[in-house]
Image (cartoon, helix red, strand yellow):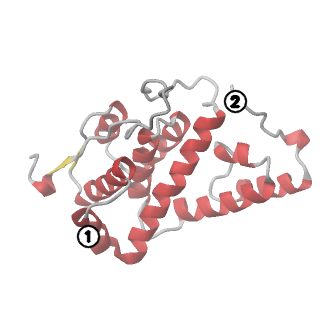
Amino acid sequence: MGRIPFPDEEGLTPEQRRVVDAVVAGPRGVLVGPLRAALHRPDLADAWQRFGAMLRYDTSLPPRLSELAILVTARRWNSQLEWHVHAAAAEKAGLPVSAMESLRVGETPHFDDEADAEVYEFSRELQICGQVGEETYRKIRNRWGAVGVVELTTLIGYYTLVSMTLNAHHIPLPDGAESPLELGGPCPEDGSLPVRLAAIPASTSRADGSAS
């Protein structure tokens, strides 16, 4: 059950209708998730949907890697709906199901593909530490160039916004869908700021010699 009402088809203002029509006509095909909340402010929702469509569908990164970065973000912020939507998209894009399952349950994922391992580690470090190590950054820049590393960083930041919006407003899963992620404990009541919300272990890959 959401914490706020979500505009329905019958009650849309002309401004909201324009946003919904643009989303439906675009690559998403349907208005879901955080845009349901953002629609309360149509100009915000419009900027949001255009920005998100560019980052998800129109970067130099292949869908497989974009979806991997999104899943790391969903797991970091315990975002049930984000994981639900993007796990299906990641599988369709060819991300190994075994790696996705390891990430979902908080175990160390294994990647045969170096590009997968590099994007995973970049996303993991940025989400857990708020920084990216020199070697990790260099690998992404060497493979995807300055444009690619900027796109990946922005993608991770955008889906952090998506996660927080989904979580704060309790935007629900589709009817009949079960929560895919096990959540951590409650937010501390003593005013402290925990360093981590969800542990994301480093991966193993054939590239680094840590797994055969």
C-alpha distance separating marks 1 and 2: 42 Å
Q: Secondary structure at mark 2?
A: loop
- Amino acid carrying label 1: it is Arg
Q: Residue under circle 2?
A: 2
Q: Residue at x 91, y 55 (%)?
A: 14
Q: Give the percent coordinates (x, y) of residue 138.
A: 26, 70
Q: Nearer the viewer, residue 192 or 205?
A: 192
Looking at this view, is 10 or 126 the one in front? 126
Circle 1 residue: 138
Q: Residue at x 29, y 38 (%)?
A: 98
Q: What amino acid is at disc 2?
A: Gly
Instruction: Tally the numbered discs.
Output: 2
Which image quarter: residue 165? top right
Choose between 67 and 162: the one closer to the eye: 162
The picture quadrant where one finds residue 11 is: top right
Residue contact at pointers 1 and 2, CB within 8 angstroms: no
| Residue 133 in the figure: left or right of residue 127 | left
Residue 3 position within the rendered picture, expressed as x and y whole percent measured from the top left: 71, 30
- Give neighbour class at mark 2: few <14, some 14-19, many 20+ (Cα, 10 Å): some
Return the residue found at the far bottom: 146
Q: Residue furthest front?
A: 190
Q: Position of residue 57 (x, y in %)?
A: 54, 62
Which is nearer the N-term, disc 1 or disc 2? Answer: 2
